[in-house]
Image: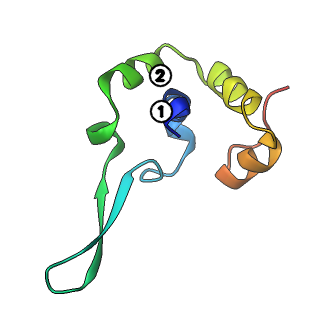
Amino acid sequence: MKENQNLFVALRDAFPTDALDRVADVHEASGRHASHRVPLDAWVPVHVAASARALDERAARAALAGGVPDAAALFADLGLGEPPP
């Protein structure tokens, strides 16, 4: 996702609220497994957020679709509808 972070951030409203959170699975001292979530606004770099604000939704969708061999399947999996032509 790193090279396309700005595209996903620009499309953030198209995803469920916590879909772009960073999730870390950790072993606690007790041996128990736990997942820790970090909200998007807390982990996305400032320059990526600025770049995302410069994109409109159509441009972000088109750029994401253009860089994915099976864009239709990806867009369907992500619930983004049909990729732009």
Name the residue: 49% across, 27% down.
6
Q: Is residue 38 above or below residue 30?
A: above
N-terminal label among 1 and 2? 1
Q: Amino acid at mark 2?
A: Ala
Name the residue: 22% across, 86% down.
31
**Residue closer to the observer: 16 or 21:** 21
CA distance separating discs 1 and 2? 6 Å
Q: Is residue 74 above or below residue 49?
A: below
> Label 2 neighbourhood size at 10 Å, few (<14), some (14-19), many (20+)?
many
Image position of 13 (left or right of 21): right
Image position of 72 (left or right of 57): right
Please, which colouring scheme is shown? rainbow
Q: Position of residue 17 (x, y in %)?
A: 44, 50
At mark 2, the secondary structure is helix
Q: Amino acid at mark 1?
A: Val
At mark 1, the secondary structure is helix
Name the residue: 49% across, 36% down.
2
Q: Position of residue 24 (x, y in %)?
A: 33, 61
Proximity of marks 1 and 2: CB atoms separated by less than 8 Å = yes
Q: Which residue is mark 2?
A: 52
**Residue closer to the observer: 7 or 33:** 33
- Taking the view exactly as shown, the residue that stands out farthest to the right is 85
Q: Is residue 43 above or below residue 49?
A: below
Q: Position of residue 75 (x, y in %)?
A: 72, 45
Q: Position of residue 25 (x, y in %)?
A: 34, 68
Image position of 12 (left or right of 28): right
Q: Which residue is mark 1?
A: 9
